[in-house]
Amino acid sequence: MIKDVQQEILRMKKENDVCILAHSYVAHEIIEIADFTGDSYALSVKAKTAPQKTVIMVGVRFMAETVKILSPEKKVILAHAESGCPMAEQMDRDTISIVKSQYPDYKVVCYINTTAELKTICDVCVTSSSAVKICKQIPEKNILFIPDCNLGAYVAEQIPEKNFKLLQGGCPVHASVNEKEVLEAKAKHPGALLLVHPECTQEVVKHADYVGSTSGIMEFAKNSDAKEFIIGTELSITGHLQYECPDKLFWNLSQKLMCKNMKLNTLYDVYNAILGRSGEEIELDGETIEKARKCIDEMIRLGG
Ligand code: 13P
Ligand code: SF4
């Protein structure tokens, strides 16, 4: 049954000139039919070069907005209309405009997990895989980093020569894991390496053997000689890695690491989105696209 739906999607996407981009957090059966799968940074870069006229983003809203900003001439559809990222909604343009006026000599660096509207007033965007590299290259010493204070704290630690101002935002899923769970998981799997996403809190990150983006974690596990890993990011990554590396063992750091927004995306959403029966076409006005694009182009320039 799943195979039949997948075959039909593959046929329809070719016929309708559709490119399917899937974030690594979505289900295995969607990843199998995607043209490209990756972390937020890789998806943004890929979006620029995809030759198809229509892009279906299977992920969360800010990812689809990023595709639209980089390719305004394309029809961009978010596969599940309600799949948003709570972190991206935490800070709005008006609030950050006020904060900016209080820190006039700070460069504003925003995580890509923000709305298109907020990006219009930021200087440069970063992703978890590019944040350290980009912040190091910014000539200014003072950086206002929004919205994720956990990612911000991790980046600040890597660049002690710079001065970071952080605000209280972040991913409710990753931030829900605590140090006690880390110690329990390590005690249960004493030989395993701990790989975590920098959206986790510092009390978790400090115990990690590797800290990186979703793709970074997957690459590290695949290339490592180690045989056992505790995965400190969304539960789907543990499953994907177990498929790809059947000779290794993968454990979830915490059962709380479940992003219900990413989980909203189903194979049938993709099928229905191609047929125009579900999903949401992303519409952004010209001014928003132009201003937000500067911030994303700067990310690609410095992060490439
Ligand atoms: P990545 O940049 O690692 O894909 O992270 C996106 C995200 O939303 C993690 O929760
Ligand atoms: Fe947003 Fe967190 Fe879900 Fe990533 S895991 S999409 S940051 S809520």
Image (cartoon, rainbow, N blue to C red):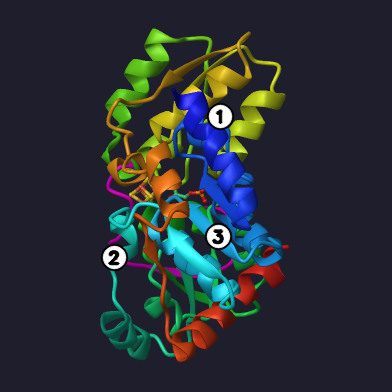
In the shown orientation, is residue 127 left or right of residue 14? left
Label 1 packing within 10 angstroms: few (<14), some (14-19), many (20+): few
Residue 253 in sight from this viewpoint: yes
Answer whether residue 254 is magenta in the image. Answer: no
Residue corresponding to mark 1:
209
Q: Closest to the observer: 178 or 173?
A: 173
Q: Is mark 1 within 8 Å of ligand 1?
A: no
Q: Secondary structure at mark 3?
A: strand
Tell me the magenta residue range. Answer: 157-173
Q: Is residue 225 above or below residue 95?
A: above
Q: Which mark is residue 288?
A: none
Residue at image mark 2: 89
Tell me the crowding category of disc 3: few under 14, some 14 to 19, or many 20 or more residues within 10 angstroms, Cα based: many
Task: Please say whether residue 160 is visible from this viewpoint.
Answer: no
Predominant SS of the magenta segment: loop
Spatial CA distance of label 2 from label 3 is: 23 Å
Could you tell me which residue is drawn at 44 percent across and 50 percent down? 59
| Res. 55 mark | 3
